[in-house]
Amino acid sequence: MYQNDAHGWRSAGRGPGTANVRLNRQRGNALFIVLLIVLMVLGILALMVGSVNRASGEIRGAKDHLQRLYTAEAGIQQAVLDLSRGGTGNLGSEAEPLPFDDGVFWVSTVEGANDTFTLVSTCELHGKRRVLEVVLRRAADPFARVVYAGNEDDNPGFVFRLSGVGNNADSVIGDMYVGADVDVTGNATMMGMVASSGTISGVQGAEGVHEPAPYFASMNYSATSDVFVKEEFDDSGVFGSSPLGGEAWQLPETSPAHMLRKNPSDRLQEIMSTSKDDYFLEDPYEAVRADKRRDGSDAHAVSFLANPGGTDARTVFYIDGNLWIHNREMFSTRVTGPQGGNAKVTFAVRGNIYVSDSVFLNDAYNDGVAFVALKDPAVADSGNIFLGDALDQALDEVQAYLYAEGDIRGVRLHELFSPEVHVRGAVAAGGIVQLDDPNSTDHKKVNLEFDSRVDDGYLELPGIPNTSESLGFVTVSWREIGANGGVAAPQGGQTSPTGGGTAKAGG
């Protein structure tokens, strides 16, 4: 419906008032939308702030959790330092803890058997705790003296004897520790310090002394060695004959363990006397040399391959079986490095080691070999080194470092067949060292000469424990027994997250 007025025709009810109402409504809707957006932004900001606060709290919590661990480990290190200085290893207490940064800690230490110590370190920070338990063993470097005979089983009949008269008298050059009595008679000579847990007769020395044993279990050879000999033969072994004697399992010349033969048929008597596989150190790719003068001038060479990218052979061989240095065609073996390099090798043997042929180094200054005999819990009387030959009763020279978890024993060392056995290196055993035959009236001269190259750092043999940087202790086990007030699962055998040490099972 239209009306006529002074401004002409216009619609009824659509005057200026209606337009204002519409504009007001639009403005109200816009304001509502703006307010809604503002509320949404504020909500998002609130969520972000809350998330940031939660993240900050989590970061602070994670930082505190890690700081508790670091502080507990720092407590362990301080306790070890205290033990190394003759202290008890007890630091503070729960009632009187020691401050560390913005937390506190305390350490309790209990001495156990076999030179072991159990350390429990607790850190408390902002009302929560972390607790570490570390078992340490005081250990000595294995080749820091010419003789170490720990006698860990307290063999009541063991006495370390040096004897002989005139040119047949025993001679020892270097320091010695024996966990039993020492008896020096005749014209035998001792040039070095003698320490004994018992009594000493015939020479001056320190009596009633206890020195910790080397601890080769920390090396974990069964997992960390460079060459696993059994697996090499399982993968690449070929049965064949050799001028070295009989038929045996052998490896390709390119194998790092090619200088070993397994179970040769011409030595059945020796093989049948043991319960595990027998590996013989003889190189089928080198000429057979008898060395009839038995002075090393014509010794059979066993050659080692250089490490990839290097010129030297620096290799740890792990043998789950027995190792023999024993050949019926030869008297001597010569450890030889790769062309243009040297051999620095260690044989870790989970079984026994039999040394009946002489061992020479091609380079007496830069080559080195260590033979380590480890006990096999499944085999009685394992972890021993036997020096001598039950067949020809001859052994002249051993230029090597010897360590046995069990014993080191002489086998029928007879003066008529070999007037002197000379060991240049070191002789160390967790059990006894008995080079004379206590049931024989014959005496073969024993000349033990300390090779100090390992001890003074000139020769670095792989796979040999070194306690010089750990204050004379090695880690047997490490675990966390409390976190945030709870008890964590044992973690023995794991590496400390902060590098504080490792706990490793025996090889």
Image: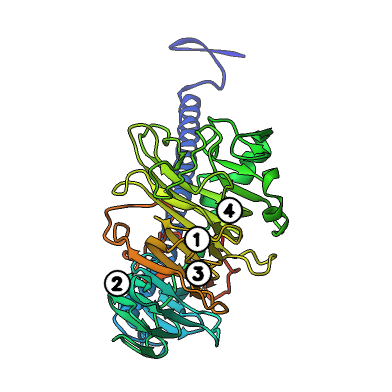
Q: Is residue 231 left or right of residue 129?
A: right
Report the disc number at residue 101.
Answer: 2
Q: Residue furthest top?
A: 8
Image coordinates for residue 82, horizontal then vertical, percent: 31, 80
Work out whether 500 lies above or below 122: above
- Of mark 2 and mark 3, the one earlier in the sequence is 2
What residue is pinned by disc 3?
Answer: 476
How busy is the neighbourhood of tag 3: few (under 14 within 10 Å), some, or many (20 plus)?
many
Residue 323 at x, y = what percent?
Answer: 58, 53
Q: Amino acid at mark 1?
A: Phe
Determine whether, in the image, residue 275 is placed left or right of residue 196.
right
Label 1 residue SS: loop
Disc 1 to disc 2, how far (Cα)?
71 Å
Looking at the rendered structure, the kind of residue marked 3 is Val
Other-residue count near label 4 (Cα within 10 Å), few / some / many at <14 / 14–19 / ≥20: many
- Mark on residue 417? 1
Residue 323: which numbered mark, if any?
4
CA gap, disc 4 to disc 2?
A: 54 Å
Q: Going from the N terminus, do you reach mark 3 or mark 1 first?
A: 1
Residue at x-position 41% and y-position 61%: 465
